[in-house]
Image (tube, rainbow, N blue to C red):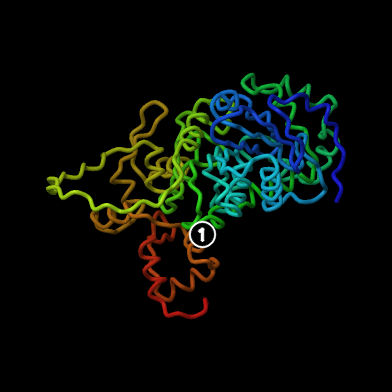
């Protein structure tokens, strides 16, 4: 279907050499060094990355793009699925690069697009840096989290008819709204980013939000076997995605590393571009994997055993959330309800670790509780994804003897026990 015309002149100029539309609008910054491709999120354009690109382009070749339906890229009526965005990105990179594997850096929905592209063409991707990765345990959690930061997001989710009318009336470039928004936006957000928030159509906004954010289901799509290394750079004050979702996922996914930015939120490319630059540069500098001849290590005396350090008596709320695989808000709820003991100092809780462990695992002996919490374990959703079945089938498997445990009232599965049980089952079609 033919793209819908849109007013390109309102976008203004974008730094870098324009590469045309193939089918996405793209620009190149820098002329030497490893290849980096920056993918914006919903209601963002290539100019969202200006602060990061200024640093990276010194010693990297950086390609920035506008997603399909946003900014200077075409605005078709259809095609705003995750696969549609990934296909448009792949076609563009095939046209404007020489086939060199690229490090992809994405923001929020742009991370989902980057991962979908990497899943389709792993040889074309050297690695991914995800900022604000939309890693949700369920669609319900995604929709709840998206209501936190913006009233417009609540309109999109709760009042779709009104949001559609508002978008079709005010968005698309030009008009008074972008100028008013610049006056109301925080000073830290560049005027160009505020302006470009309105360069889209309703179909691209709603379709991308649904397919690449609230309905992306990244835990179900990407299990242990994802073939591309990824660094999730995530602010611990991100109100859109709890950082605990990612630290939990990294326990069972060897390709995922989580780098927590203390005191930062979901706009790291604007508020902390040096952190993004460092993460991308480090990943781009990694040598490609090579097959090496194994050389037996020299024989050395066995090191003297070192006594394991005793766990701390108290934990911060953030560390307690990581141990329990829940959000800090949940930990605070346990403390306020009296289920978990804690000492308050100013605005911070110091969680009693023994009380937390007792709440998590109930009547288990202390040694067994510590052993369980130290293992890599999965939620029911992650277990279903690992086995390639639905939730109802997982419950039938539990009834048939698949090992599971209870932690804080939730059913969890130890990864090693789950794999051993699956391997021991008779070869037959799935239930």
Q: Which residue is mark 1?
A: 381
Report the front residue among 106 and 284: 284
Number of numbered discs present? 1
How far across and how far down the image is residue 310, in percent?
21, 42
Left or right, 314 with reference to 271: left
How far across and how far down the image is residue 371, in percent?
28, 55
How far across and how far down the image is residue 292, in percent?
36, 51
Q: In the rendered view, tell whether residue 152 sits above or below residue 123.
A: above
Residue 346, image quadrant: top left
Residue drawn at x 52%, y 29% as measured from the top left = 277
Q: In the rendered view, tell whether residue 345 sits above or below residue 134.
A: above
Left or right, 316 with reference to 225: left
Q: In the rendered view, tell whether residue 370 sits above or below residue 31.
A: below
Report the front residue among 32 and 121: 32
Residue drawn at x 43%, y 71% as measured from the top left = 398
Left or right, 313 with reference to 205: left
Assess disc 1: are there few (<14), some (14-19) or many (≥20) residues with their C-alpha within 10 Å of its C-alpha.
Answer: some
Report the front residue among 45 and 390: 45
């Amino acid at each position: 279907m033919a793209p819908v015309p849109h007013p390109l002149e309102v976008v203004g100029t974008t730094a870098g050499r324009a590469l045309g539309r193939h089918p996405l609008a793209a620009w190149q910054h820098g002329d030497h060094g490893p290849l980096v491709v920056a993918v914006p999120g919903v209601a963002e354009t290539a100019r969202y990355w200006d602060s990061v690109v200024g640093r990276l382009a010194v010693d990297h070749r950086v390609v920035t793009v506008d997603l399909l339906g946003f900014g200077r890229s075409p605005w078709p009526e259809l095609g705003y699925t995750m696969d549609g965005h990934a296909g448009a990105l792949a076609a563009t990179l095939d046209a404007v690069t020489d086939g060199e594997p690229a490090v992809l850096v994405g923001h929020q929905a742009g991370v989902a697009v980057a991962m979908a592209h990497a899943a389709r063409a792993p040889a074309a991707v050297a690695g991914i840096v995800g900022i604000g990765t939309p890693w949700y345990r369920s669609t319900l959690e995604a929709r709840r989290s998206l209501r936190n930061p913006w009233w417009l997001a609540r309109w999109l989710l709760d009042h779709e008819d009104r949001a559609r009318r508002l978008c079709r009336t005010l968005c698309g470039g030009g008009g008074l709204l972008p100028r008013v928004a610049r006056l109301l936006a925080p000073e830290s957000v560049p005027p160009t980013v505020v302006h470009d928030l309105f360069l889209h159509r309703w179909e691209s906004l709603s379709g991308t939000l649904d397919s690449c954010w609230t309905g992306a289901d990244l835990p179900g799509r990407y299990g242990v076997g994802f073939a591309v290394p990824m660094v999730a750079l995530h602010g611990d004050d991100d109100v859109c995605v709890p950082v605990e979702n990612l630290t939990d996922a990294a326990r069972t996914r060897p390709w995922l590393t989580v780098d927590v930015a203390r005191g930062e939120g979901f706009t790291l490319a604007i508020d902390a571009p040096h952190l993004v630059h460092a993460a991308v540069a480090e990943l781009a500098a990694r040598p490609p994997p090579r097959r090496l001849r194994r050389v037996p290590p020299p024989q050395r005396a066995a090191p003297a055993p070192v006594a394991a350090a005793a766990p701390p008596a108290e934990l911060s709320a953030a560390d307690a959330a990581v141990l329990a695989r829940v959000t800090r808000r949940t930990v605070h709820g346990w403390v306020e309800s009296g289920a978990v003991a804690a000492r308050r100092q100013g605005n911070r809780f110091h969680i009693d670790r023994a009380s937390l462990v007792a709440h998590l695992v109930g009547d288990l002996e202390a040694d067994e509780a510590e052993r369980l919490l130290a293992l890599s374990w999965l939620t029911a959703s992650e277990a279903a994804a690992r086995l390639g079945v639905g939730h109802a089938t997982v419950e039938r498997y539990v009834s048939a003897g698949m090992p599971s445990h209870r932690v804080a009232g939730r059913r969890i599965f130890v990864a090693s026990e789950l794999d051993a049980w699956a391997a021991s089952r008779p070869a037959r079609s799935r239930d």
